[in-house]
Amino acid sequence: MSKPTLPSSASSMPNWQRDAQDHLWMPYCQMKTASSPLPVVATQGMHLILDDGRRLIDGMGSWWTACHGYNHPHIAAAVTQQLSVMPHVMMGGIQHPQAALLATRLAALLPGDLQHVFFCDSGSVAVEVAMKMAVQFYLNRGCGNRHRFVSFRNAYHGDTTGAMSLCDPVTSMHAHFKGFLLEQYPQALPHTEEDFAVFEAFVREHSDSLAGIVIEPLIQGAGGMKFHQLNTLRGLREVCDRHDVLFIADEIATGFGRTGSMFACQAADVVPDIICLGKALTGGTMSFAATAATNRVFEAFYDDNASHALMHGPTFMGNPLACAAANASLDLFESEPRLQQARALESLLQQELQPCAALDSVVEVRARGAVGVVQVKTLDRIPQIIAAGVQRGIWIRPFKDMVYVTPPLNMPHDIARQLCCTIVDVLSDWDADRLPTEASL
Ligand SMILES: Cc1ncc(COP(=O)(O)O)c(C=O)c1O
């Protein structure tokens, strides 16, 4: 395999990996002890391309974002064209066609009357905006005490302080910020009738101080890839209705086809009051997010009273390049069978990862849409698992107590099978303690 050509600025840095070690502060890792990061210089289709020319099948889809695979020519063309016309313009007092088109298309795609789209720059900020909208929804209606949220065990909603306060207070990586964070009402996610009775009693008791219930619909992602049933979502919606509490769906990970429908809430016929979108919004090309609200929520802000306005406005909100990428990504959802592809991947992942279930250390194999999970009793030697994957041609990044994949929704089945077979191989060696102790990539 020939070595890929680097952009000129990077090719003038022959020692870029050493320089990175000195200056790049990496996410979610102890810099002192972490293994060397993977040197990726290009992406193509379903693959990451390494500095030495090796190509890895990407099992991660760059954290759920690359829903059409990498470097899709339709998105690249749209962004390139927009770059020459208007890379950015502020949105304070200005509107532009790409943002108008995207907001209109999202409003048409979203369930119910989620008609009002507020753009922002990352998923965590979309969650902050949703929280602020919910609190101010009640403030504007004269209920000043409603500033707390019910969130759920195993929840993950982002890394900014408001979003952190919604994460699982015990098992999440943000647990040691307790005291610094806003206090919320973390609850067990109700599944059965009895669970719901307990849950509803809690909501009834606290409804005077509650602004919203926040949920990652169908799949709780970074908190453990936990799946729940459609009825749980329906039940939560009903509890919200009975106690006049806003239902906030964080579809940052699940949105745009990941679970097999465009938005996970649609599978349950549930319309949230507020929905957060991000990740795959731009088809995996750049950071962008949105918070959309129903007419009822919007109307609580729409007033002659200036203080009822939503005072929020990230500098890069509605960035035209990001809007162009998102519009091009929506074109692909229209012209290609992405949702069917996600649903077909569900059966493939379930079937092809299933041999892992026979391993002593494995508790369960599960799949929903284009998410496959091998749940283990205790996950150890993570760097060795990652390295074995890389040496055998795949990129996976296990965490907590699982090995999981979130590949592009359009991953061809032969490649998806190769990904799964390699995971089965690596985990068999891990289970039998046959992985080399050296975690070299
Ligand atoms: C459900 C959910 N909400 C919010 C976020 C935060 O998004 P971002 O990383 O873009 O801030 C994430 C990121 O993984 C997520 O999975």
Image (cartoon, grey):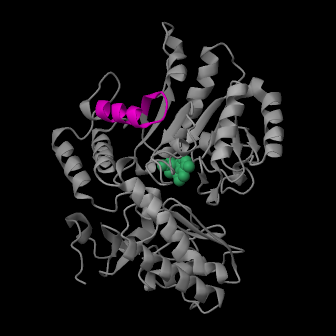
The answer to whether residue 406 shows anywhere in this view is: no
Residue 373 drawn at (x, y percent): 58, 68
| Residue 77 sits above or below residue 412 on the image | above
* Residue 346 seen from this side: yes
Give left or right: position of 131 versus 76. right
Q: Position of residue 24 (x, y in %)?
A: 44, 63
Q: Nearer the viewer, residue 172 or 396?
A: 396
- The quadrant in which residue 32 appears is bottom right
- Vertical order, 188 against 312 (above or below): below
Q: Residue at x 65, y 86 (%)?
A: 431
Q: Nearer the viewer, residue 350 or 199?
A: 350
Q: Position of residue 434 (x, y in %)?
A: 60, 93
The image shows residue 319 at horizontal and vertical percentages of 32, 38
- Which stretch is magenta? 99-118
- Residue 143 is drawn in which quadrant? top right
Whether residue 13 is in magenta: the answer is no
104 within the magenta span: yes
Quarter in which the N terminus is drawn: bottom left
**Left or right for 265, reference 184:** left
Look at 67% across and 27% down and name the residue there. Answer: 241
Q: How many marks?
A: 0
| Residue at x 44%, y 59% (from the top left corner) | 342
Query: Could you tell me which quadrant the C terminus lies in?
Result: bottom left
Residue for point 83% across, 34% down: 201
